[in-house]
Image (cartoon, rainbow, N blue to C red):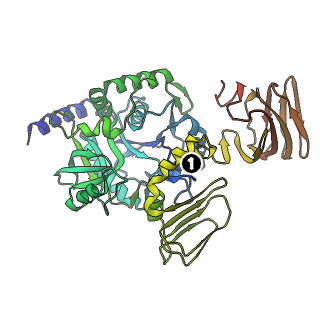
Amino acid sequence: MDKRTTHAEQHNAAVAAETAIDSRRLVQVILAGGSGTRLWPVSREQYPKQLIDVVGDQSLLQATMKRMDGFTKTWDVAAEPVIVCGVEHFYVTSEQASDCGVKPRVVVEPARRDTAPALTLAALTASSDGDDPILVAMPADHAISDVPALHQAIEIAAQHAQAGEIATLGVPPTRADTGFGYIRLGAQLQDGAHHIDRFVEKPAAELAAQYVASGGYWWNSGMFVVRASVWLAALKIFQPDMYRACVQAYENAKRDNGYIAPGADAFAQSPSDSIDYAVMEHLGKPDSPFIGVVVPLEAGWSDLGSWDAVWEAMEKDEFGNVANGRVLMEGATTTYARSQGGRLVACVGTSDLVVVETDDAVLVADRSHVQDVKGLVSRIRQTNAPEADNHRKVRRPWGFYDSIDNGERFQVKRIVVNPGARLSLQMHHHRAEHWVVVCGTALVTRGEEQFLLTENQSTYIPIGVQHRLENPGHVPLQIIEVQSGAYLGEDDIVRFDDKYGRCN
C-alpha cells in the first residue's frame, strides 16, 4: 500500500467516524442547470433539453426524478430529491415535478457557475436538517435504458461513499467518441471498481481511439456518489474561494416551502468550475487526502449530447431510421427526423441525416457533423435572432404565450393564462396592447379601473398605463394580444407587483 493510499484511508476513516449520523441515508441530487445547445432547435436557452420529452413520453428531468424508484431497501432513500436549477427554469421544473408526484427541494441558482457550486449548494441543503446523507448526484439531461443496472452501480458506489470515498460512475466505452470526457483507470478493487488515476477532457478522434483500444479508460458519466460532509471538506481544501462563496450564499438564502434561493451577491463571488476540474482531478495526486473511485456503469447510458446520440438511444426501424412526430420516410436509411411543430416532415432517399422541425426553425445536418450545432447556435445568437434562446411558444409561471405573427411596429400573440393565475402588474414605455378574449373570463386591471371581459369582448391598454391580466375562472383563459409601437422587445416590461417574485 503506498503512502498516498494510507494517508487518504486514514482521513476518510476519520471523516466517516465524525459524520456517522444517518449513515445509510441517500439523497438524490439532480443537476438541472444545462442549456443543451447541441439539441437546437428543440432545446433553447430558456427551455433546455432536460425539460423536453427527447426520448420518451416524459421529459428527461421527469425521467431522472423517477430514477431512484425501487432502489434497494437496505438504504434509506429520501422522498424529496434536491434539484438545482436556474431561476428561469424554476416554475417549469416545479410543474414537471408535481406532474409526476414528486415534491423536491429546489435550489435556484442566481447565476450559472457550473456543476461544482451546484453540488455544493445541494450538499448544504441535504445536510441542513442535521443529517449527513450520501448524495447521489446525476445530471437531469441523460438517458438510462436499464435502471436496475444503474441501481447496482449506485449500490457499489454508495458503499464506497459510506467509507468516506468519492465515487463516480464510469461507462466502459463502446466506441471512440470525442464528445465525452474520459477517466483513466487506476488499480482495480474486488467489487469491480477502480481507483481513479486521472480525468481526461474530451480528446481528439485519434486520441479517443487510443484510449478505447487500451482498455484503460472509461467514459465520464457525470454521475457522482459522495457523502455531503466529504464533498464539502474536499471543496474547502481544493477550492476554498468557491467553498466560502457557496456557504455564504446558502446562509443568506431565502426559503419558502421547498424553494431555496441563495444570496445572489455572495454566489456571484464563486468561481465557475465543474465537479471534475474543481475536485475530481485532484484525487489521483499523491498528496490528495481523499480517495476517488470509479464504478462501472453498463446501463444503456447516454448523455444525449447531440442529435446523433438521440438517434443512438431510440428504437429504429429495419432501415435504421428514427421518426418522431409527423414524419414519413421513403427510401431513407439511418435518418433521424422529428416534427416538433406539427408540420409533416418527409424524407426521401436520405442517409445519415438529422432533420428537426419546430414552429420557427428547421435543422438539417449530416449525422457526422451534429457536434457543430453548438457553434451554429452561437452564430445565431450573434445576429440577435430570437431563435437561439426562445421558442415561438414561451412558457411563463402563469401559462404561456405563442408569437403568431410580427412585422414592423406590430406583433400578435396568443396568450393562455392558467385558472387562478395572473400576470404581473406592469407597464410598457414603448408599446400599446389590444386584448380580445377568445375563451374564458379575464379580470383586467387598467390604471384605476378593474373589470371583467368574456368571450368576444376586448379592451385597449395605452402606452405607459399600469395593467394586469388575471384568470378568475376554472378553465384556461385564451386571448389574442396585438402589440403596436416603436419597440416590442420583452425587456420593455416594468413590473410593480408579481406573485412569482419577478419585480424590477
Residue sitting at x 71%, y 26%:
495
For residue 90, which quarter of the picture? top right
Q: Is residue 303 above or below residue 95?
A: below
* Quadrant of the snapshot with the C terminus: top right
Inspect this view and state whether residue 447 appears: yes
Where residue 444 appears, as percent x and y from the top left, is 84, 33
339 sits left or right of 228 in the view: right
Identified at 44% across, 64% down, the residue is 312
Q: Furthest-right residue in view?
A: 457
How many discs appear?
1
Residue 331 pos. (x, y %):
55, 79
Quarter of the N terminus within the rendering: top left
Query: In screen coordinates, is 315 left or right of 390?
Result: left
Q: Is residue 46 left or right of residue 242?
A: right
Nearest the viewer among 44 and 275 is: 44
Residue drawn 20% across and 56% down? 216
Q: Quadrant of the rendered structure where residue 459 is?
A: top right
Which of the 4 quarters of the picture holds residue 56? bottom right
Residue labelled with disc 1: 101
- What is the x, y in percent for residue 410? 79, 40
476 is higher (above) or lower (below) than 344: above
Badge 1 amino acid: Gly
> Is 465 located above or below residue 114 in the figure?
above
Compared to residue 93, the image places residue 427 above or below, namely above
Could you tell me residue 403's position as x and y percent? 73, 46
**Mark 1 crowdedness (10 Å alpha carbons): few <14, some 14-19, many ≥20:** few
Judging from the image, what secondary structure is the residue with disc 1 in?
Answer: loop
Residue 304, visible in the rendered structure? no
Residue toward you, 348 or 52: 348
**Residue drawn at (23%, 44%), measured in percent from left and top?**
198
